[in-house]
Amino acid sequence: MNRLPYAGEAGLLLCHVCGRACAQVDERCPRCYGTLHRRKPKSLGRTWAYLIAALILYIPANLLPVMNTQMFGNASENTIMSGVVEFWEGGSWDIALLIFFASVVVPCLKFFALGLLLITVQRRSQWAMRERSKLFRFIELIGYWSMLDVLVVALVTALVQFDSLSSIEARLGILFFGLVVVLTMLAAMSFDPRLIWDAEVDDDRASTPGPA
Amino acid sequence: MPSTPSAQPLDAPPSLPPLLICEHCDTLYKPVALRRGEATTCLRCGAVLERARRLSVQQQLALALTAAILFIFANAFPVISISLEGLSNAATLFQSVQALNHGRITPMAAVTALTIILAPLLQVTLLCWVLVFACRDQVAPGFRLCMRTLEHLRPWSMLEVCLLGILVAIIKLGGMLDVHAGVGLWALAMLTVLLITLGGREVRYLWDDFDGRLT
């Protein structure tokens, strides 16, 4: 079969720091001295660990209030979802959608996509490899936008400080939510998209034995 | 903004790296010479392999120095100010970080500080350092460390998210109070554009420029 050559088959690997093509026998990149790995070390285990930790923290992130608002004597506690609903009912449906996407859709999409990628890679699936590659790049691209809510709470808390008249305070929920964002980012960084394509390489090798 | 004429020659003819490897699927390619605005994509997985260099080292340095000045403005001046019945208040980026610095939420203050202040600050500083020397065709002291740090910082610099957050905060508070955009916001907006331009892959070409000259 005439297919594109893999670097691994030519005895080469990519330095992730400086992008140089290095020989597989090298331990460190001769140009930037970065440690070389054929694949990111313990990629699957690390990604699973970060992902599961993020999933667990996502529960308190949604249940606990993220903000406490005191306006002219009226106090109210907002969770992430109740903040979205408040915007929606207040007529700002566009902002409501924006926050809903950043705080709910993006994290959930990340959980789902990373889970899907991990399971398919472990099963050495050759299904939709190109599409799965694109999916990974997509979640890497959108992942950090979830930080939006944390930054909004920080800004609003810093601004509205009029002692008795009105004040806004950050609540514990924002800590959990922020940790979810950080953990899903770490999960995406630990995943090695080249593992998707390894299913193809090893299958070829099984039929035509070559250099290991 | 700098206006370096495009006819100005580069310090050295751009040398092609011997081989290209797609970082998303490990496919091996022979690099081709790219013209301005062109990019190559991986035939196997569709990822961008390489983009033509858009900025010369001089242009990058000019933008990095501009970014340094903008960084000072973005942090020294408030990004939003509000007023309510005669009382007024304003918040800088650092004050927003401090707002999270209480009780059990403190770890989030550290994360926020990293994403909106520390990472951009380090990016700007390291870019200026590396580029000042590159402009004189010299390898900056600590070049490897600087370049590696830049590479690792990239995902943690979230100024564009911060910018959107400020807009959301303005609309959120706009219903109850008088809200004004501060000087810091404009500086931050321009800084964001510059860091996206510079902080991406553009600086990676320096590795190729100095290939073989690193000691």
Image: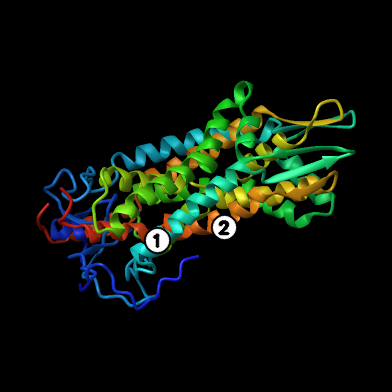
Crowding near the residue tagged with mark 1, few <14, some 14–19, many ≥20 C-alpha atoms within 10 Å: many
Q: Position of residue B153 (x, y in %)?
A: 41, 45
Q: Callout 1, which amino acid?
A: Gln
Residue at the spot of label 2: B190
Nearest to N terminus: mark 1 or mark 2: 1
Q: Callout 2, which amino acid?
A: Met
Can residue B204 be seen here? yes
> Front-most of A53 and B147?
B147
Crowding near the residue tagged with mark 2, few <14, some 14–19, many ≥20 C-alpha atoms within 10 Å: some
* Chain for numbered disc 2: B
Q: Residue at x 30, y 39 (%)?
A: A42
Spatial CA distance of label 1 from label 2 is 15 Å
Residue at the spot of label 1: B60
Q: Position of residue B15 (x, y in %)?
A: 20, 68
- Circle 1 — which element? helix
Quadrant of the image occupied by residue B192:
bottom right
Q: Position of residue A129 (x, y in %)?
A: 37, 61
